[in-house]
Every structure is written in structure tokens, then in C-alpha cells.
Amino acid sequence: MKRIKIIPRPKPELLVPPPSPPPPPLPTASVVANDKASDKREEHARDIEINNLKDDISNLKKEMMDLKAQFDNFIKQSQQQQSQQQQSHQMQQQQQLKRGCICDFVEWVDALEITSEDLEKLFNSKDVCDWACSFVVDDLKKKSFEHVPICSIKGSKSDILIYISKNWTKLTDEELLVQFVNKIFKKLLRTFTDWKNENYKSIMMNDKVGSVYHTNNARILSFNENATKLKLKLFNALNNLN
């Protein structure tokens, strides 16, 4: 038989526990002092940064105030300058009205403007030449001239004088056509075209508006073909104005 060796258990009092780990070393006085010094340096750096930010903000506020003052001063000067310009313009207009317009016939015709109100008057008129004469007379009435640019010769059949190049001269049929009729025709056509573009949908969809367009389109296109008729009517209108 095989022999079995039995090893007896050791007694509890003979068991030795493992040694405990050593406690952490306590900070020395020098380490504590270094930590406090480091904290103070960081706090001092933060204080400096905060003070610098405060200074920057204060400087920005001052710059903003300076810019606002400069802007307010600029606005004030601009308003004063604009007011002075308006006063100067008004004085020039008043002086111009006192002494009258010094424009001659060509300059007067070039300055004529046909407004939408004038166009409405044309729509309501029976004859385009009558409308043109009324347009001329109305403009002459509402303006003051040093030398009236156009007038009739009373007692003549249909002679008209125009003031041009500081001289009075009789208006020829060619001058009437070139210097007056053709220019009025272009101004009238431009205003009528603007009206057509603004009312295009109404012209296409409304029979009444469409009729107004087609009727006056034909009248306006034939305007510069009526120079002889216009001259006689203009002569009579100027006669009644004098």
C-alpha cells in the first residue's frame, strides 16, 4: 500500500499578517509656502488681466463718445449747409421771378414739360391743335419773362414773333416745324408712351381705356402733320393773350 503523509494545519496564533503600506508623507513647510506663493501669483495675474480689460472697455467708451460727438457735429453741419443751400436757391428763384425768365424761344421750348395732367387734358380735348395752343398759353401765363419768347403781331393775318439770340424775328413755317412742332411732338409722345406702359393691362382688358389709347395714339402720331393749322390757331391764341 502507498503511504499518505498528513501535514497538520498551523495554529492561528502562528499566522503573521502582511505589513501595512507606509502612510503618505506629510507636506513640509516649504512645499506649503510654495503653493501659497503660486496661488498669489495666479491671483495677481488675474487681477492685472481684469484691470487691463477694464481699461480697454473704458478707452472704447471714450472712443465711442468721441465718434458720436463727431457724427453729431457732422450731421449738424450738413443740416446747416443744406439749409443755407435751400435759402440760397429760394433767393435765386425769387430774384429770377422779379426780373423774369431771360430764356429765348429755343430755351423756352426745350424747358417745356408735358405732365400726366397735360395728357389728360389732351384726352378730353376735341382737337390736338387746340390742346397745344392751350398748353402754350397756360405756360406763358404762369411764368414771368424778361422777354416773352413768343407773341403774335396784331393786325397781321398769322404772323408770329419769337425772341431768339437777343433779337425779335418772324417765325417761319420751317422754324415752327423744327423748333416747336417736332419738339412738342417728341415730348408728347414720350409722356403718352409712359402712360401706355403704366396702363398696359387696362388697355388690353378694358374696352373704354383701350378706346382712349387707340384714339389718342392716332391723334398724337398725326400731330406734326398739322403745322399750318397749328400756326393759325396759335396766332389766334396769342392774340387773345396779349
Image (tube, helix red, strand yellow):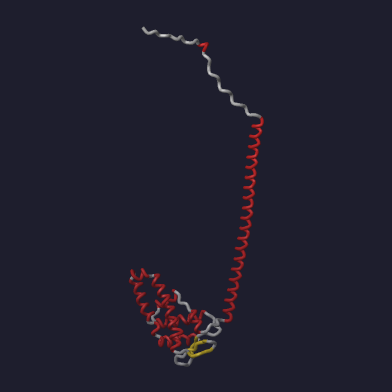
Q: Residue at x 39, y 71 (%)?
A: 197
Residue 74 vertical placement versus 56 (above, below): below
Left or right: where 158 falls relative to 34: left
Left or right: where 119 falls relative to 168: left
* Residue 196 rendering spot, x and y as whole percentages: 39, 72
Q: Nearer the viewer, residue 96 or 140?
A: 96
Q: Residue at x 49, y 83 (%)?
A: 106
Q: Quadrant of residue 81?
A: bottom right
Image quadrant containing the N terminus: top left
Left or right: where 204 falls relative to 180: left
* Residue 177 rendering spot, x and y as whole percentages: 43, 86
Which residue occupies the extreme front position in the image? 1
* Residue 232 rendering spot, x and y as whole percentages: 43, 88
* Residue 180 rendering spot, x and y as whole percentages: 45, 84
Q: Nearer the viewer, residue 205 or 49?
A: 49
Which residue occupies the extreme top position in the image? 1
Q: Residue at x 47, y 86 (%)?
A: 238
Q: Quadrant of residue 147?
A: bottom right
* Total labels drawn: 0
Q: Quadrant of residue 4?
A: top left
Q: Nearer the viewer, residue 93 or 44?
A: 44
